[in-house]
Image (cartoon, rainbow, N blue to C red):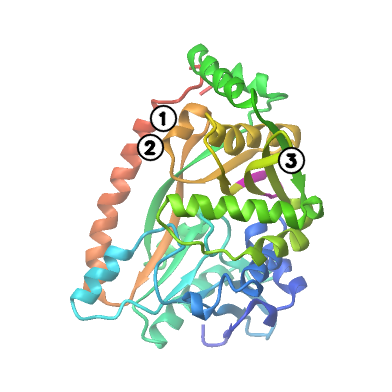
Amino acid sequence: MSDWSVKLHEGIHAIPAKIWDGCAGADNPFISHAFLSALEDSKSVCPDAGWMPRHIALHAPDGTLAGLCPAYFKMHSWGEYVFDQRWAQAFEAAGGHYYPKLLSAVPFSPVTGPRLLIHPDAPAETSVIMTDAIRQICESLEFSSAHITFCTVEESNITTGRDWLPRLGVQYHWHNNGYKSFDDFLAALSSRKRKTIKRERRDTTADLTFHVLRGTDITEADWADFYRFYENTIDRKWSSAYLTPEFFTLLSQRLGERVVLMQARSGTRTVAAALNLMGTDTLYGRNWGCEGEWPFLHFELCYYQAIDFAIAHGLKRVEAGAQGEHKIQRGYQPVLTHSAHWLCNSSFRNSVSTFLEHERAAIKERIAELNTLSPYRSDES
């Protein structure tokens, strides 16, 4: 890539939104200039938080912009959802320095999407050149490693072909098989599972009402309620709040109708809320929280209301975030996620390669087991 050039930008605003989004496309809101700038402008992502933006711009030999890549120098592994802390411990126990590392990802968002944002008019080899550029940046800075998380299958295949290490994960997504209503979806399930979901919805909706707000219809008071619930959930998980209150208000200002806030109310009091973002064909569930104890409220607000919304808006999928085998019984099916890893130290790389080979086999075996738990009728699976 001697005739190609690479530049690292210390913030998303160094790249105009029109240029960034021209490479990112409009399908996935998480890789949009609006989303990434809300993270940076709210100080949710900043050096003090251990995230140093270093977005990559790749220029073709003729000087034109060929591609972009959201990238960060990381001083820890928090907020990534692809866990490499044991790798860090092993590398440092052997006398190395695992951090800083280079990460291409969307911070705090375990959402699959493109990471190599290729300009529509770029040369065909641009993705391969970008992959090599990321590795070379890592090597030139003497970083331990480079990571591309929640990338597309195509990107995983490209990186694997360039000797990166592929890693698999599991999430649970709901697929819209042309349903016209929630009852239409229920009809595709076995009788027992259908009755269970009906009972859960009945028990939840007996005392609560549910409301959907979008974009600028979400008020400061709504966001204040949501952030309180968000902090409650974080506290219960013995974690810390990565996202600042300003992030959420910036999000609704910048992404508009693509921000979908679902609320549960007891009378006039909001007692729970779930944040979703809407792509071209997918609803992405992100954060949620509540006050008080309400039976099956999490299932209703985060899973069933999301399905209702997806059907009403003709969306193909609901991606309800990381983890949660309990989602299977509620119509969400296991799918593989992908990431790619480059480790500079050859001995360390060989050890991790062996680990990942066994992990991939175990995950594929687990997927097969999980598919036997499908709640769908055999003719619908």
Q: Kindly identify which residue carries mark 2.
A: 367
Mark 3 sits on what residue?
212
Of 232 and 97, nearer the camera is 232
Q: Nearer the viewer, residue 321 or 334?
A: 321
User: Label 3 vs label 2: CA separation?
Assistant: 33 Å
Tell me: 315 left or right of 364. Answer: right
The location of residue 223, given as percent across then percent down, is: 69, 55
Q: How many marks?
A: 3
Q: Position of residue 135 (x, y in %)?
A: 43, 77
- Residue at mark 1 to residue at mark 2: CA–CA distance: 6 Å
Give amino acid for label 1. Asn
Which region shows up in magenta? 277-284
Dot 2, crowdedness within 10 Å: few (<14), some or many (≥20)?
some
Could you tell me which residue is drawn at 64 percent across and 22 percent down?
Answer: 206
Question: Quick check: 99 left or right of 320?
Answer: left
Q: Is residue 183 magenta?
A: no
The quarter of the displayed image where residue 182 is located: top right
- Identified at 65% across, 44% down, the residue is 283
Residue on which the image places disc 1:
371
- Seen from the viewer's position, the closer of residues 279 and 115 is 279
Q: Secondary structure at mark 3?
A: strand
